[in-house]
Amino acid sequence: MKVLVVEDDLSMQKAIGMGLRKFGYAVDVASDGEQSLRLAQVNEYDAIVLDLNLPKIDGIDVLKEIRKFNQEIKVLILSARSEVEDKIAGLDVGANDYMAKPFHFKELEARLRALLRRKFILTDTRISHGDFQIDTALKQIYVRNQLIDVTKKEYGILEYLMIHKDKIISAEEIIEHVWDSQTDLFSNTFKVHINSLKKKLAVHLGDQEIVRNTRGIGYFIAGVQHESV
């Protein structure tokens, strides 16, 4: 999943970004309101972690602008403004959750994960498909309850496909949600990761291929009725 972290305190911005990347998120960062709006308009994020006390454009005004062109993206406000009125103001203009500073990173990640489950209408942290299962909380993959050793990017690819397992997903869309915005869309990085993922799954599944692709269209989870891209 891809997250935009908007925070003008560079040490905190770095800490949140590093922490989320360790959990397997793709992370872009912005240090002021103007930059955050530019990024939100040109990239497709699954969630935004938004500070309120921002240079150039205040966080509340950033959120108002975002809601003009995107009603669905999940926004978690993270701010030193802890008064009830500030929380109400943030929620009233479209925030999905509000955390006051100082905060515990594990709670931030848990709340972010809960928001993303809501976005994709997941009621459980585990998603199953036949003998195959992923755990969105632990970021782990299981085949017949046996843990499979995968990289964070390999897990991210599979998680996105499983969340959208009723559709065929283009490589470009997967890259958009699993890698940060600095990734070269024309590099072989994606193909290397998805081929490695397929080989690891084949060790446990044999001929039962879970991840398949339709040339020129995209990738999908085998055995599911699909809509068009």
Image: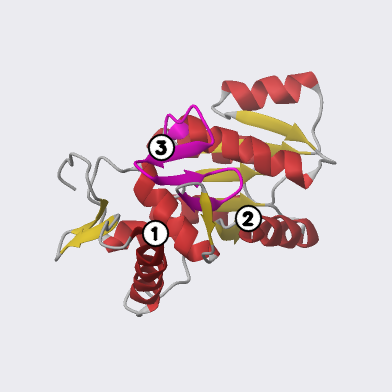
Amino acid on which disc 3 is placed? Asn
* Mark 3, residue position: 70
Asked if the magenta segment contains residue 177, the reply would be no
Q: Nearer the viewer, residue 81 or 151?
A: 151
Asked if the magenta segment contains residue 130, the reply would be yes
What's the image's color scheme? secondary structure
Q: Is residue 25 visible?
A: yes
Which corner quadrant of the image does residue 53 belong to? top right
Q: Nearer the viewer, residue 118 or 90?
A: 118
Q: Give the residue displayed 75% in from the left and 19% down from the top.
A: 85
Please identify, in this view, whether the residue under mark 1 or under mark 2 is nearer the observer.
Answer: 2
Q: Position of residue 140 (x, y in %)?
A: 55, 52
Neighbor class of circle 2 (other Cα within 10 Å; few <14, some 14-19, many 20+) is few
Q: Look at the numbered disc 2 and give the secondary structure of its residue.
A: loop
Neighbor class of circle 3 (other Cα within 10 Å; few <14, some 14-19, many 20+) is few
Which of pointers 3 and 2 lies earlier in the amino acid sequence? 2
Q: Is residue 198 left or right of residue 153?
A: left
Amino acid on which disc 1 is placed? Glu
* Mark 2, residue position: 23
Q: Are marks 1 and 3 in contact (CB under 8 Å)?
A: no
Q: Nearer the viewer, residue 223 or 32?
A: 223
Q: Position of residue 159 (x, y in %)?
A: 44, 50
Q: Nearer the viewer, residue 213 or 83?
A: 213
Q: Give the residue displayed 62% in from the left and 60% down from the top.
A: 21
Amino acid on which disc 2 is placed? Phe
Please identify, in this view, whether the residue under mark 3 or under mark 2 is nearer the observer.
Answer: 2
Magenta highlight range = 119-143
